[in-house]
Image: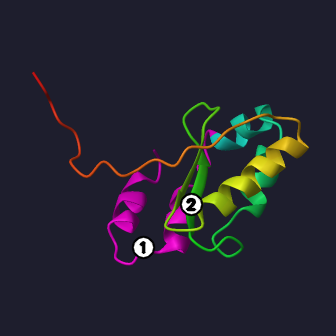
Amino acid sequence: MQRIAILTHALGQSPPNPALIYSAMQDAIHQPYRKELIPGLTEILQSVKPKTHPGLLGICLSGAGPTILALATRNFEHIAREIIGKFEEAEVRCRWSLLGLAEEGSTVER
């Protein structure tokens, strides 16, 4: 939450700025403490970056975990396999899902 203004600005740019988005997704308040609770996450956050994984915009621990959020514009499977491989090395089983954008935003239905 501490960098939400930067993140919303960066996500609104066209084309997206991976360096700005990646930086905005780095939580310096909660993530440093929580990442130690998830085997393999420290290595993932240090090695899976836009410069080494084309198409990646940013990566973070989502909430208190255990979800890892990776924003990307392409190479979804390659990025996911890299993350899953690092978790497997730490003996953590996981799966990945490709989610689409919510084009409508919030809606209320009655």
Location of mark 1 (residue)? 16
* Label whose residue precedes the other's in the sequence (1 or 2): 1
What residue is at 41 percent from the left and 52 percent from the top?
4
Amino acid on which disc 1 is placed:
Pro
Q: Percent from the top left, x then y, of residue 100?
A: 40, 50
Quadrant containing the C terminus in the rendered view: top left
Task: Give the class, few, some or many, for how many residues have Cα within 10 Å of label 2's Cα (few <14, many ≥20).
Answer: many
Answer with left or right where residue 40 lies relative to residue 22. Answer: right
Question: Looking at the image, which is closer to me, 49 or 110?
Answer: 110
Give the image quarter of residue 93.
top right
Along the viewing direction, whichever of 14 and 82 lies nearer the viewer: 82
Q: Secondary structure at mark 2?
A: strand
In the rendered image of this protein, does residue 26 appear above or below residue 30? below
Looking at the picture, how far across and down is residue 53, in whole percent? 67, 70
Residue at the left extreme? 110
- Mark number, residue 73: none
Q: On the image, numbered disc 2 is attached to which residue?
A: 58
Lateral position of residue 36 relative to residue 103, left or right: right
Disc 2 marks which amino acid? Answer: Gly
Residue 43 is situated, as x and y percent measured from the top left of the image, at 82, 53
Magenta region includes residue 20:
yes
29 with respect to 34 (left or right): left
Determine the image quadrant of residue 48: bottom right
Q: Which residues are magenta?
A: 1-30
